[in-house]
Image: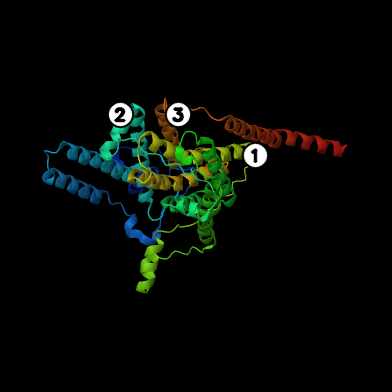
Amino acid sequence: MDRPRLTVDPMPPPDALTLHQRRQLAAAAHLERTRPASPMFHESTDPTLEFFYHPRTLSVLVVLLAGFLYVALYVDPSNDMLNTKWGLGALCSVFVVVSIVLFRDGPFIRPHPAFWRGVLALNVLYEMFLVFLLFQSKQSGRQYMRFFDPNLGAVLPERSYGDNCALTLKNVWDGIDIFVLAHSLGWFGKALIIRNHTMCWIMSITFELMEYSLAHQLPNFNECWWDHWILDVFTCNWLGIYVGMKWCEHFKMKTYTWHGIREIPSLRGKLSRAGAQFTPHDWTVYKWAPTRRFKSFAGFVWFAVLIMLAELNVFYLKSLLWVPPEHPLVIARLSLLFLFSLPSAREYYEYYSNPRCKRMGAHCWMLTVTLLTELLIIVKFARGEFTEPFPRYVVVFWSVVASLLVAFSVWQFVLKKRFGKGLRKHKTR
């Protein structure tokens, strides 16, 4: 629950306050300012680096104004496009700085709570850009991409990986490109986010099935069977999941004994402690247990849906907005989404598993809105793009999957309990 707010009895006018009463008011104001975003996360304080946990608002203000002064005096005012980019960059910088100063802390305190407040600010900025894009036409949206790179705005040649599907060494070698590394890195990151081996494998197989189902819309999903299962699932995805889960096991088994840098006598120890600042302060193992109750099952399914949206949205967005897959904009979106997902998954798990947690944290809420806004953009811009209907086998397959999920939930959470109660009553007679 929320930390209790300090209540103070009605006070006389400020000039008549005693020293004790003034301290009470100051303590109440401090609690209100530092109250964490999630009611189940405690105050984010790391006593080992005290210097970095003192307020630096005036220092931030001086640095920000110095940057504005440099831009105002030394940037060429005759270049309108450059001025627009500098202006938008300054606008985003001010928003991030203000958010770092004013936002509440999230679930993580390493490397610093301010870092994760900045991540939340970037998520808000990305969501505002998506909302703006949602109200544009498809052609305008493609042209806006030229603001980031003048070479964008042209139709992309989509590469198909399913032209020659004979299982030969040459074909397999030709199928290996930079995206093999991207697969492994992606699933390494998702393992750190999901923190559950079984769920990682469910998501990995589900995504390959989604590629089969959407190959008629996105040509680069048209892969050979061995590309789907040998290269992707049992090589790249397995490697990423294996290494990621090993990292999770390391953090789970690690003994967290944090000492201040000043308490460490050797230079090597001080450097090691400084590097440890970028590792977790502690580690929470995610035990999803979807069959425990219906809320857990529904939450598990919704979490899986969000993961699939995060995976699929990027493919549709780059196809509809004509952005090449290797472009820095795509890489930036994936990197930002990874940062957004780390605290979001922690807050979602707290909401999912803790009955006392009655609301989602800010990171989780913001990322959910972001993914759904991306989906709305895709639905709007996809009009007239994907005219080929879904194959019959795809419709039948996912209808069966949905029916099995509904049937399982009815059996597990309704019929099984009733039969169990009836059986127990029969035995007691």
Res 357 visible? no
Give the amino acid type for the residue marked by disc 3 in the picture: Phe
Kindly indicate whether the residue at mark 2 contacts the one at mark 3 (C-beta within 8 angstroms): no
Q: Nearer the viewer, residue 240 or 42?
A: 240
Q: Which-is-in-front pick, marks 3 and 2?
A: 3
Give the amino acid type for the residue marked by disc 1 in the picture: Arg
Kindly indicate whether the residue at mark 1 contacts the one at mark 3 (C-beta within 8 angstroms): no
Q: Which residue is mark 2?
A: 140
How many other residues sit within 10 Å of disc 1, few (<14), some (14-19) or many (≥20)?
few
Q: Nearer the viewer, residue 158 or 140?
A: 158
Q: From the viewer's perspective, tell me whether residue 355 is left or right of residue 46.
A: right
Question: Residue 420 at what x, y percent from top left?
Answer: 77, 38
Q: Residue furthest bottom?
A: 266
Q: Secondary structure at mark 1?
A: loop
Q: Which-is-in-front pick, marks 1 and 2?
A: 2
Q: Which residue is mark 1?
A: 293
- N-terminal label among 1 and 2: 2
Q: From the viewer's perspective, tell me whether residue 164 is left or right of residue 139.
A: right
For image coordinates 75% across by 33% down, the residue present is 418
For image coordinates 30% across by 37% down, the residue present is 13
Q: CA distance from mark 3 to mark 2?
A: 19 Å
Q: CA distance from mark 1 to mark 2?
A: 47 Å
Q: Nearer the viewer, residue 323 or 277?
A: 323
- N-terminal label among 3 and 1: 1
Q: Which residue is mark 3?
A: 386
Give the amino acid type for the residue marked by disc 2 in the picture: Ser
How many other residues sit within 10 Å of disc 2, few (<14), some (14-19) or many (≥20)?
few
Question: Residue 391 at what x, y percent from top left?
Answer: 56, 30
Q: Which-is-in-front pick, marks 3 and 1?
A: 3
Q: Secondary structure at mark 3?
A: loop
